[in-house]
């Protein structure tokens, strides 16, 4: 049977990549299936989705400002207009299934689909669910969650704990092969720092203040700054670039970098599922402006499990960061224990499990 599926979600890679993984598995199971992505005009999906070979349509919708303002009214108006656009897309494409993976673009499409009685599923990546998914959960057919902690926020009869779909590049990543390609010796201590698809200014500036100390300790640092902060950090990093520091604007080979790492410094967004699968000890620094403070809740899950060190951004200093890096990186027993704890939080079959749910909804 030839099926049609719409995936909607975006804004950040954390919403887009799970949808991409699911779409590829749908095509593997249903050769000839038609897949359409629906996102926002300014989201990261505009770069990622076409590169993956999928068709993308966009809605004129934006995220809701936190503070009461005229912009909130404009956002509500755009959301209502987005629902009208979404209804037109649903009518023209006539999907057998509509899947939402988070982000403000998912709300109008999934709401329109649920109200029109299309089979619907939403996926929540975070331990503390977004407002979008909490609202949608009342109307959709199924809710897949990455963290057990998130299940209590949704109608229990709709919830399935599935984990977060992983990119094929993560599933196939191998530490030894990655180190060989990156010219990293087996005995080298490797620290990878990444601030997410948009970068993380405070994280990058704090890390850059540790470059000299890390070089003295012969720690190989791969710092993914994000495009926004690359130029400023490059000026600071000039004298340290060399055998112990590699500065990267945007990592197209992030799965390879993560696989090669002994320790990862990161924002606790969608990357946490990848760190869990790869069994990587981490230092997680939540973004205080993240919606619903969801990054803090993600980091708390890993910290309480013994898989990560949680550092709130307002307490972050170069001294503290350097101290925590050394405590973990030069203690093999700690590294090994954190690695086991991290892998214990992973869901290697998440993509398959969610696609089983999708097949159930279609049938």
Image (cartoon, rainbow, N blue to C red):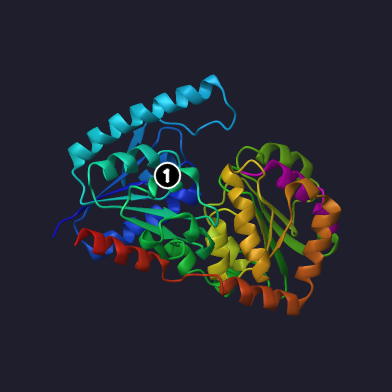
* Rendered position, 268 above or below 111: below
Q: Position of residue 342 (x, y in %)?
A: 60, 71
Dot 1 falls on a residue whose secondary structure is helix
Q: Residue at x 29, y 29 (%)?
A: 84
Quick one: 244 or 163, which is closer to the camera? Answer: 163
Q: Which part of the image, by quadrant, shows the C terminus?
A: bottom left
Identify the image quadrant of residue 249.
top right
- Judge whether residue 115 is colored magenta: no
Q: Residue at x 57, y 47 (%)?
A: 250
For label 1, the residue is 135
**138 to the left or right of 362:** right
Q: Residues within 10 Å of mark 1 (few under 14, many from 20)?
A: few
Q: Which part of the image, by quadrant, shows the N terminus?
A: bottom left
**92 to the left or right of 67:** left
Q: Residue at x 76, y 69 (%)?
A: 328
Residues in magenta? Answer: 199-213
Identify the image quadrant of residue 30.
bottom left
């Amino acid at each position: 049977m030839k099926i049609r599926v719409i995936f909607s979600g975006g804004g950040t890679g954390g919403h887009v990549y799970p949808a991409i993984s699911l779409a590829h598995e749908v095509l593997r199971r249903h050769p000839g299936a038609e897949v359409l992505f629906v996102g926002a005009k300014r989201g990261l999906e505009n770069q990622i989705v076409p590169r993956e070979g999928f068709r993308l349509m966009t809605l004129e919708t934006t995220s809701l400002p936190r503070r009461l303002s005229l912009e909130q009214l404009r956002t509500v108006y755009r959301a209502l207009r987005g629902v009208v656009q979404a209804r037109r897309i649903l009518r023209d494409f006539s999907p057998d299934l509509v899947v939402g993976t988070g982000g403000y673009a998912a709300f109008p499409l999934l709401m329109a689909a649920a109200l029109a009685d299309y089979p619907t599923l939403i996926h929540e990546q975070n331990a503390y669910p977004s407002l979008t998914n909490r609202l949608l959960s009342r109307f959709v057919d199924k809710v897949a969650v990455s963290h057990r902690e998130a299940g209590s926020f949704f109608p229990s009869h709709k919830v399935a704990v599935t984990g977060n779909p992983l990119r094929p590049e993560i599933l196939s990543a191998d530490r030894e092969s990655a180190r060989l390609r990156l010219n990293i010796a087996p005995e080298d201590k490797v620290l990878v720092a990444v601030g997410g698809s948009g970068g993380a200014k405070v994280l990058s500036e704090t890390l850059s203040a540790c470059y000299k100390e890390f070089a003295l300790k012969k720690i190989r640092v791969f710092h993914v700054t994000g495009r926004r902060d690359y130029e400023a950090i490059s000026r600071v990093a000039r004298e340290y670039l060399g055998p112990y520091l590699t500065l990267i604007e945007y990592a197209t080979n992030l799965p390879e970098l993560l696989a090669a790492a002994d320790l990862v410094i990161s924002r606790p967004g969608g990357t946490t599922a990848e760190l869990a699968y790869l069994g990587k000890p981490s230092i997680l620094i939540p973004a205080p402006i993240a919606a619903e403070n969801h990054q803090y809740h993600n980091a708390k899950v890993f910290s309480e499990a013994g898989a990560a060190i949680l550092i709130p951004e307002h307490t972050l200093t170069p001294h503290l960061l350097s101290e925590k890096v050394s405590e973990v990186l030069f203690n093999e027993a700690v590294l090994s224990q954190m690695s086991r704890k991290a892998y214990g939080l992973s869901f290697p079959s998440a993509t398959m499990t969610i696609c089983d749910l999708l097949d159930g909804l279609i049938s």
